[in-house]
Amino acid sequence: MNKKLSLLLVFVSIGLLSLTNFAAGVVVINNPLNVGTFKDLLLAIAGAVGKLVGTLGAIMIIVAGILYLTSAGSPERINKAKVAMVYAIAGIAIGLAASGIVLAITEMLKVK
């Protein structure tokens, strides 16, 4: 019961604090993403995801190379390394094309 009461008091105090700020006209909310349109937001997200996927793809190329080097001639392990390499290259290609994909979709949908 004490946890519920404490939580209620915290929420009430936050509510009262925010009401006093709104009444004084002090609240200014800045745009944390620095984007003005939905298209810019999608491009920012695509750029971040593209960088992440590209980085992970580069790491996976290294892992695939290590898998290939440590396969010791086993056809199963060599095939596993080749498949990992193909997926890593595909991931890098998608990462590089992420912003272009978003631009193509927004042009098709006429997003402004």
Image: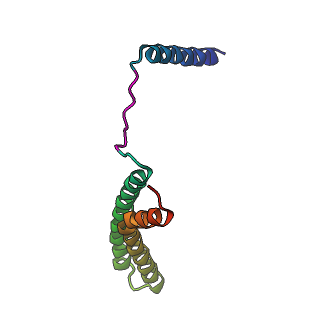
Quadrant (top left/top right/bottom left/bottom right) for the N terminus: top right
Front residue (pair 33, 87): 33
Predominant SS of the magenta segment: loop
Magenta-colored span: 27-34
Please identify the quadrant where the C terminus is shown. Answer: bottom left
Q: 84 or 105: nearer the eye?
A: 105
Asked whether, in this view, residue 74 is left or right of residue 59, the answer is right
Measured from the top left, where is residue 42 in percent x and y?
Answer: 43, 54
Colour style of the rendered protein structure? rainbow
Query: Where is residue 94 shown, x and y percent of the image?
Result: 41, 69
Does any portion of residue 60 appear in the rendered image? no
Q: Position of residue 39 (x, y in %)?
A: 42, 54
* The one of 55 and 31 positioned closer to us in this rendering: 31
Q: Residue at x 37, y 37 (%)?
A: 31
Look at the image and say whether residue 28 sits in the magenta stretch: yes
The answer to whether 100 is drawn above or below residue 31 in the figure is below
**Does the segment drawn in magenta span residue 60?**
no
Residues 33 and 72: in front is: 33
- For image coordinates 47% across by 57% down, the residue present is 111
Q: Percent x, y for residue 37?
A: 41, 48
Identified at 36% across, 33% down, the residue is 30
Q: Quadrant of residue 89?
A: bottom left
Res 29 visible: yes
